[in-house]
């Protein structure tokens, strides 16, 4: 998945670049393996924050360390250049921010009450939530201190770019390694789900809207008659739709037979009861 995301933001998103992920990981590892320094945003501080995150046993108290590690990582990797990747800097200056507040907002005649643990949003939007007496705080102090605590003012959904929810494991997390090495990249393959072939005489699928072009999935010819791709992010092709509808028809028939058998059994029990 990361390989696919990186390709979309590369200089040649339409071309296959199987070594792109490997090149990016090597550059990131080179930054993370730098010798420790006193700079608050030095990459070595990422390990310190992650070790603090791993040592926490209470979920809510671990949010701050995670946010600090993430914001230091953003700053450390901001000027990183990888061959083949876009090097145009973004003016969003996105950061991680502890939230753990319900964000109330009306939408489609309903009020949202979701309470994300941590959010990603532009620094300017997060800084706007500071009280007036703290507006003299610098950006570095905010990213390491204020962003790692609950905001004084509640955030708005229109500013949130992404949400992060935590599920803390019961066992203690391991500490960060002293150095990082990049393992060889092994490409993954799409998953297939076995389905039965369509029955003869299955009703034809309704015509697809002319404005929509169904994606044709690269399923091998030898597998087309017995497999269909399983990917919720990709539209099913006509073969997969036919197979899916056929499976639904079979399931419906099986349920009807089960109901009929259950009905006959119930009727027989009632007749026997009357005779007794």
Image (cartoon, rainbow, N blue to C red):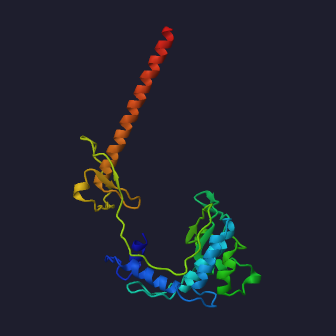
Q: Residue furthest right?
A: 133
Q: Say which residue appears at 25% left-offset and 55% top-offset.
A: 223
Residue 266 rendering spot, x and y as whole percentages = 47, 21
Looking at the image, can residue 224 be seen?
Answer: yes
Image quadrant in which you'd find residue 141: bottom right
The tally of labels here is 0
195 left or right, relative to 173: left
Looking at the image, can residue 122 be seen?
Answer: no
Q: Is residue 148 above or below residue 113?
A: below
206 left or right, relative to 126: left
Residue 41 rendering spot, x and y as whole percentages = 61, 86
Depth check: give the residue in front, 266 or 60: 60
Q: Is residue 177 above or below residue 250?
A: below
Q: Residue furthest left?
A: 222
184 left or right, relative to 63: left
Image quadrant in which you'd find residue 85: bottom left
Q: Is residue 79 above or below residue 223?
A: below
104 left or right, relative to 28: right
Q: Is residue 108 above or below residue 125?
A: above
């Amino acid at each position: 998945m990361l390989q696919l995301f990186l390709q979309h933001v590369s200089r040649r998103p339409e071309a296959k670049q199987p070594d792109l992920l490997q090149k990016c990981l090597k550059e990131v590892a080179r930054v993370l393996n730098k010798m420790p320094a006193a700079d608050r945003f030095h990459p070595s501080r990422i390990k310190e924050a992650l070790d603090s995150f791993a040592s926490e046993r209470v979920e809510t108290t671990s949010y701050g360390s995670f946010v600090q590690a993430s914001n230091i990582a953003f700053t450390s990797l901001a000027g990183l250049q990888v061959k083949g990747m876009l090097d145009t800097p973004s003016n969003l200056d996105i950061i991680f921010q502890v939230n753990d507040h319900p964000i109330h907002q009306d939408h489609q005649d309903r009020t949202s009450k979701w309470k994300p643990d941590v959010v990603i949003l532009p620094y300017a939007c997060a800084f706007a939530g500071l009280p007036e007496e703290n507006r003299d705080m610098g950006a570095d102090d905010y990213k390491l201190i204020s962003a790692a605590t609950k905001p004084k003012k509640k955030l708005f959904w229109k500013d949130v770019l992404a949400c992060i929810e935590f599920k803390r494991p019961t066992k203690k997390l391991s500490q960060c390694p002293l150095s990082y090495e990049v393992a060889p990249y092994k490409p993954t393959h799409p998953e297939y789900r076995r389905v039965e072939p369509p029955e003869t005489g299955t009703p034809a699928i309704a015509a697809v809207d002319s404005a929509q072009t169904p994606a044709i999935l690269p399923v091998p010819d030898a597998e087309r008659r017995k497999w269909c791709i399983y990917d919720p992010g990709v539209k099913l092709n006509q073969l997969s739709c036919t197979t899916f509808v056929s499976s639904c028809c079979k399931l419906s028939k099986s349920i009807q037979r089960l109901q009929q058998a259950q009905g006959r059994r119930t009727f027989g029990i009632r007749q026997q009861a009357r005779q007794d």
